[in-house]
Amino acid sequence: MIHSNADTAANKAKGAAMEIAASLEARIQSGEVAPGTPLPTERALCEEFATSRPTVREAMLLLQGRGYVSLEAGRRPRASKPTLDGILTSAANHISNLLGDAESGAHLEQMRQFIEAAAARIAAGNATSIQLHQIKAALEKSQASIDTDDFPQSDIAFHRAIVAVVGNPIILRLHDMFVSTMLANRPSGSPLRTTDRISHDEHVGIYEAIVAGDAMKAAELTDQHLMRSYRVRLAGVGKE
């Protein structure tokens, strides 16, 4: 296979950017460069690694994606340490860029079904009395907000209370980032509001299955509820 000079140069620049990123990442991990400390200037890095400014900037973007640098307009890049939020947010952005908004949205809906159906199954067998009380409180708040603009948030709170039973901070954070965003973005005054009562009745069924300790029914009802909700939203796209 014949490679053009342009391809060779691009590959060389990419390799150099990865080398710079790896070196700076190691310094931050070791504590040599403390979080919040400005990184060396572009000029200094160009001299140290015998490379160009565009290559250094590419290295900064790589470090930002890994959570090791904070980039702000008008300021030198600063060292940082990866956080769960930062990693998951970066992953979400990459998913959207790779698949496109529509396809990534469908995949996130499927992920939501897996997470919440599994959470309902686990809650049916493991929820403590306090956790059951929290789910019930969220359910009652949801009922009180039917046919109001507060219903989407109370819907979020009900599902989140169930997911919280799992006790996994990564799963809960994924729920907060993806599921909450999808529900919160439902337009206020939408025709979908007519389904608030249906959603609440389905929530009641899920809650009762959890209280009864019926793991299979809790998971099945959750799966059916989310599939119906997703289809209603798809049917409402483009409608006034």
Image (tube, rainbow, N blue to C red):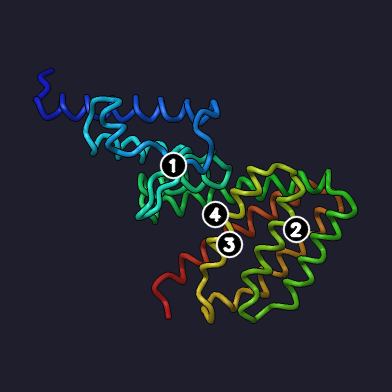
Mark positioned earlier in the residue sequence (2 or 3):
2
Per the model, the C-alpha gap separating discs 3 and 4 is 18 Å
Looking at the picture, tell me which residue is in the foreground, 210 or 35: 35
Mark positioned earlier in the residue sequence (2 or 1):
1
Amino acid tagged 4:
Phe
Amino acid tagged 1:
Pro
| Residue at the spot of label 4 | 178
In the image, is 105 to the left or to the right of 112? left
Amino acid tagged 2:
Ile
Residue 12 higher or lower than 162, as above or below:
above
Discs 2/4, front: 4
* Callouts 2 and 1 close, C-beta under 8 Å: no
Discs 3/1, front: 1
Residue 221 horizontal/vertical position (percent): 70, 55
Mark positioned earlier in the residue sequence (3 or 4):
4
Label 1, residues with CA under 10 Å away: few <14, some 14-19, many ≥20: some
Per the model, the C-alpha gap separating discs 2 and 1 is 51 Å
Looking at the picture, tell me which residue is in the foreground, 178 or 22: 22
Amino acid tagged 3:
Arg
Q: Residue at x 56, y 47 (%)?
A: 85
| Residue at the spot of label 3 | 228
| Residue at the spot of label 2 | 206
Per the model, the C-alpha gap separating discs 2 and 4 is 21 Å
